[in-house]
Image: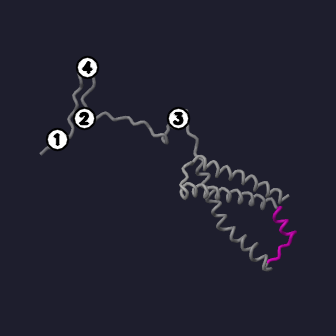
Amino acid sequence: MTSQPTSRPTQPTPGSGSRPTSQPTPVRVPPRTSEVDPRSPRRRRPPAEPFVWLGFSAGGMIAALLLPVAAFLFAIAVPLGWLSPDFDHLSAVITHPVTIILMIIGFVVLIIHSAHRLRYLLYDGLKIKHRTLVGALCYGGAVVASIIAVILVLLAAF
């Protein structure tokens, strides 16, 4: 037994000059906005969100690894007399250029981490729907706080 084709060839309309075909004409679907042709003159800006997530994760790592050590040293070990901080030694450590750079990086990513957590607390926890305003306030505040932190570190170092 021979199988019959499921669709019959279409007959050309008189005067169209086209041949009969057994397949329908494909429908051209316009590309989604995220699939813009890279050769197009209207290119989209790359999103900044991966860099914000990078700052969030770096700040989380610093918060998880370094803050407990600092809390132990300055809240327990020094007050109980286990360590005796020498002013000259601490001053030499704080004014070292590598320490200054590490403190600036550490404070900036901790502030970005805090701003990102606050932003998503407002979105998900409090269900605030003003995404642009909340993002601008959180990250704008993080930029201002980062500038203040850099100024304070530089003032303490010099």
Our reading of the magenta stretch's main secondary structure is: helix
Disc 2 marks which amino acid?
A: Ser
Is the residue marked by circle 3 packed among few (<14), some (14-19), or many (20+) residues within 10 Å? Answer: few
Which badge, 1 or 3, comes first in the chain's sequence?
1
Tell me the SS state at disc 2.
loop
Disc 4 marks which amino acid?
A: Gly
At 76% from the left edge and 55% from the top edge, which residue is drawn?
150
Disc 1 marks which amino acid?
A: Gln
Would you name the residue on which mark 3 appears?
A: 39
Rounded to the nearest whole Å, what is the CA distance between mark 3 and mark 4?
A: 38 Å
Name the quadrant containing residue 85: bottom right
| Above/below status of 97 relative to 64 | above
Which badge, 4 or 1, comes first in the chain's sequence?
1
Would you name the residue on which mark 1 appears?
A: 4
Rounded to the nearest whole Å, what is the CA distance between mark 4 and mark 1?
A: 29 Å
Could you say where residue 149 lies in the image, as x and y percent from the top left? 75, 56
At 86% from the left edge and 70% from the top edge, which residue is drawn?
87
CB-based contact (under 8 Å), mark 4 and mark 2: no
- The answer to if 41 sits in the magenta stretch is no
Rounded to the nearest whole Å, what is the CA distance between mark 1 and mark 2?
A: 13 Å
Q: Nearer the viewer, mark 4 or mark 1?
A: 4
Is the residue marked by circle 1 packed among few (<14), some (14-19), or many (20+) residues within 10 Å? Answer: few
| Above/below status of 1 relative to 101 | above
Tell me the SS state at disc 1.
loop
Could you say where residue 84 lies in the image, as x and y percent from the top left? 83, 76
Could you say where residue 62 lies in the image, as x and y percent from the top left? 67, 64
Tell me the SS state at disc 4.
loop
Q: Which mark is residue 15?
A: 4
Rounded to the nearest whole Å, what is the CA distance between mark 2 and mark 3?
A: 35 Å
Residue span colored magenta: 83-95
Would you name the residue on which mark 2 appears?
A: 22
